[in-house]
Every structure is written in structure tokens, then in C-alpha cells.
């Protein structure tokens, strides 16, 4: 079931989807656009639901195949989060 993303700041008039989905984040324009997307996400009231949903959608997807900014994280950052959780999960025990 899709998360309720009502109130998403990226959906406000004037925001450009291309800021969230840059083909290349390593260009001057790409860095500025990605920084804007990340800043906006960090103020977004639905950032947790957005990130959780995207992490579920991407599952075990490799870093190079994760595109866009969701919940304030780039594709590479989401892969690092996934990898960290995956590595720590076996050490977490129920109380
Ligand atoms: S966290 Fe970012 S990508 Fe997700 S809904 Fe909010 S503004 Fe959009």
C-alpha cells in the first residue's frame, strides 16, 4: 500500500521534479539542484513515510541503480543506509 504523502513539499507549485531526479549529481547544476531537493526534503512533513516507502520499493537495489532524492537522501545515501541496516540487523535482538 502506498504511503500517504499528502503535504509533500516537492509537489508544491514552483518546485521542479528535475531537482529531485538529476541524471548527474556531480555537475555544478546537478549539485545545486540536489542540494535544493535535500534541503526541501528535510523540511517536508512526510519525509519519514517517503523514505520508508522508497527503501521498501528499492529493496536490495544496487547503489548505481537508485535514482532521485527521497526523504532527504540521495540514491547512494539510501544504499549506505540499506547496507548499514543489513549488516547490523543480525546483531539486533528482541528485548
Ligand atoms: S521527503 Fe522529499 S521527495 Fe519525499 S515527499 Fe517530501 S519533498 Fe518529496
Image (cartoon, grey):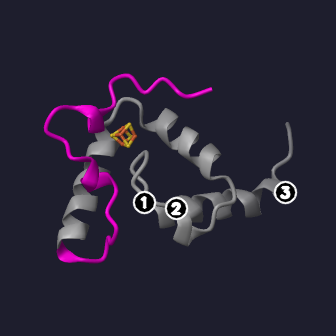
94 and 14: which is toward the camera: 14
Q: Are marks 1 and 2 in contact (CB under 8 Å)?
A: yes
Q: Nearer the viewer, mark 1 or mark 2?
A: 2
Q: Residue at x 39, y 53 (%)?
A: 69
First in sequence: mark 1 vs mark 2: 2
Q: How far is the residue under mark 1 from the one under mark 2?
A: 8 Å
Start-end of magenta stretch: 1-28
> Is 55 located above or below residue 4 in the figure?
below
The N terminus lies in quadrant: top right
> Is 45 located above or below residue 65 in the figure?
above
Mark 1 residue crowding within 10 angstroms, few (<14) / some (14–19) / many (20+): many
The residue singled out by tag 3 in the image is 90
Residue 93 position within the rendered picture, expressed as x and y whole percent measured from the top left:
86, 46
Q: How far is the residue under mark 3 from the one under mark 2?
A: 24 Å
Q: Which mark, by number, is residue 74?
A: 1
Disc 3 is placed on an element classified as helix
Q: Residue at x 26, y 54 (%)?
A: 18
Q: Are marks 1 and 3 in contact (CB under 8 Å)?
A: no
Amino acid at each position: 500500500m502506498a504511503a500517504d504523502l499528502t503535504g509533500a513539499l516537492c509537489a508544491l507549485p514552483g518546485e521542479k521534479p528535475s531537482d529531485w531526479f538529476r541524471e548527474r549529481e556531480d555537475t555544478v547544476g546537478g549539485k545545486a539542484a540536489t542540494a535544493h531537493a535535500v534541503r526541501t526534503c528535510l523540511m517536508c512533513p512526510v519525509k519519514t513515510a517517503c523514505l520508508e516507502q522508497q527503501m521498501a520499493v528499492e529493496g536490495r537495489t544496487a547503489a548505481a541503480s537508485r535514482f532521485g532524492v527521497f526523504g532527504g537522501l540521495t540514491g547512494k545515501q539510501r544504499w549506505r543506509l540499506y547496507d548499514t541496516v543489513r549488516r547490523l540487523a543480525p546483531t539486533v535482538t528482541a528485548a
